[in-house]
Amino acid sequence: MGKYYFPQNFWWGSAASGPQTEGRVSKDGKGESIWDHWYSQEPEKFFNQIGPEKTSEVYTKYLEDIQLMKETGHNTFRTSIQWSRLIPNGIGEINQQAVTFYNHYFDELIRNGIEPFVNLYHFDMPMILQINGGWLNRETVDAYVNYTKVCFELFGDRVKKWFTHNEPIVPVEGGYLYQFHYPNEVNLKHAVQVAFHEMLSSAKAIEAYHEMNLDGEIGIILNLTPSYPRDEKNAADVKAASIADAFFNRSFLDPSVKGCYPKDLIEIIQDLKLIPEMSEDDLSTIKNNTVDILGINYYQPRRIKAKEIPVDHEKSPMPDDFFDNYQMPGRKMNPYRGWEIYEKGIYDILTNLRQNYNNVRCYISENGMGVENEERFINEDGMIEDDYRIEFVKDHLRFVHQAIQEGSNVQGYHMWTCMDNWSWLNAYKNRYGFIAVDLKKDAKRTIKKSGHWFKEMTTNNGFAD
Ligand code: BGP
């Protein structure tokens, strides 16, 4: 029998984001984000043509939702402020209705013993800034830093855990390489510039926060996808995996935690003649403003083999010119999302951070399993019996526990997500929540079996089996 109990004051909870949960009501003063805009232009791109205007209606239902968080054993919860809600034009006037909403939301969480963790950017560029280039434009960095200062001033007396970005590599991949975010380009030069500006904006927001002496912590949330070579004894596979790791993990992990970019990545970008534009002191800003804490989102590993057919980088270079993805025979899959489930990956990430990143203070900020058509599992009491989700969490927690035994500095575990929410182009296809949301019945909430299990598990601060 195994026993998996966690350190005192471990953070148990879940994560969500503003754009995926809040929804819009008429005259709420919110400006358009790139998602509102994209949906208005090309609704057919979104699963079942469901757009971001309704989502799970947290804007009006947050009081009820916070009670459900309590019932599902949360002591912490992450969401994000929507930049386009707080400052509808990206810069300038503040929307007072947004201030009221976020004040009430955060106060109510605190009153109920749930510490709010607040992220400042979750893929949701205000459209008005995107028109002028979004993260491609240096001025967006200044606008963002100004927005973050407004947030710190308004909410920093109560919010003590801040995050500058969620998964900053994803807008790079989605918007500028693989076409699943607006503006839907394929352009590595732009991708590199966007990544650099996001990173710089993070360092500058950290600098601004520390200057304000608000007695809290600030960090970044990264989706770390460990890169495993097909064959560890094959040097070409190992090299290819290491390049994928440089592009997709170390591109943000190293500057965020160590304050500098990895050498191998710089060399590749230099060879491709794609070094981004920067000002003289940008690199020292990044060097001097590393994170207090790191959030780790973990869903799947990346399996890599050496490139089978060499490509000519001169034409239209892509990260994938340097490696091929590899489908490991016998891998365990989540067929709905098409992602491999590899629980040990979470341990490998934590071990890597312990050994190579000075054991940075961290927590698991997202982990989860999106499943389609969960109504199949509704029992006679109207509850979804999602035993697979319970198994998924336990299987990952065993490895988190092992990492802690070996000295990892991991402080908590957040599930993606609290209640079913809107997942970008996938809209409501795959459901991730501890709590079901019935879109046909006015977004009615019902706790799933996993939510009840989570309450019991977090009350015991772990589990035995
Ligand atoms: C993460 C994002 C979330 C969330 C989650 C699930 O990458 O931070 O916003 O969406 O993945 O993924 P998806 O919604 O693509 O199924």
Image (tube, rainbow, N blue to C red):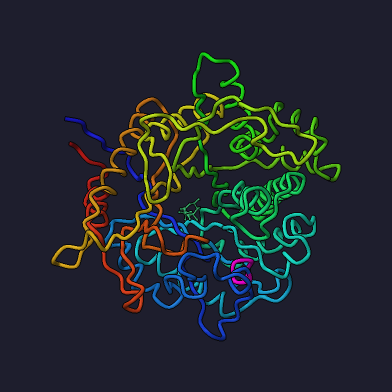
Compared across the picture, whether 171 is left or right of 228 comes to: right
Which is the main secondary structure of the residues drawn in magenta? helix
- Picture coordinates of residue 38 (x, y %)? 62, 68
Question: Which quadrant does the C terminus fall into?
Answer: top left
Q: Nearer the viewer, residue 321 or 8?
A: 321
Q: Residue furthest left?
A: 380
Outermost residue, right direction? 280
Name the quarter where the N terminus is drawn. top left
Which x, y percent locates residue 20? 49, 64
Residue 343 is covered by the magenta coloring: no
> Where in the figure is residue 102, as x and y percent of width and height?
51, 71
Where is 232 relative to 417, above or below?
above
From the viewer's perspective, is residue 70 above or below residue 195? below
Note whether 292 is above or below 408 in the view shown: below
Q: Give the image quarter of residue 34.
A: bottom right
Q: Position of residue 2 (x, y in %)?
A: 20, 31
- Going by the picture, which residue comes out furthest to the front? 309
Q: Residue at x 39, y 54 (%)?
A: 14
The residue shown at (63%, 32%) is: 246
Which residue reaches farthest bottom?
27
Going 80% across and 38% down the picture, which residue do you hit?
275
Looking at the image, which is closer to me, 34 or 47? 47
Q: Is residue 255 above or below residue 172?
A: above
Does residue 406 appear left or right of residue 296 in this picture? left
| Span colored in magenta | 33-37
Q: Count numbered badges in the picture.
A: 0
> Quarter-wise, where is residue 257 in the image?
top right
* Residue 28 falls left or right of residue 197: left
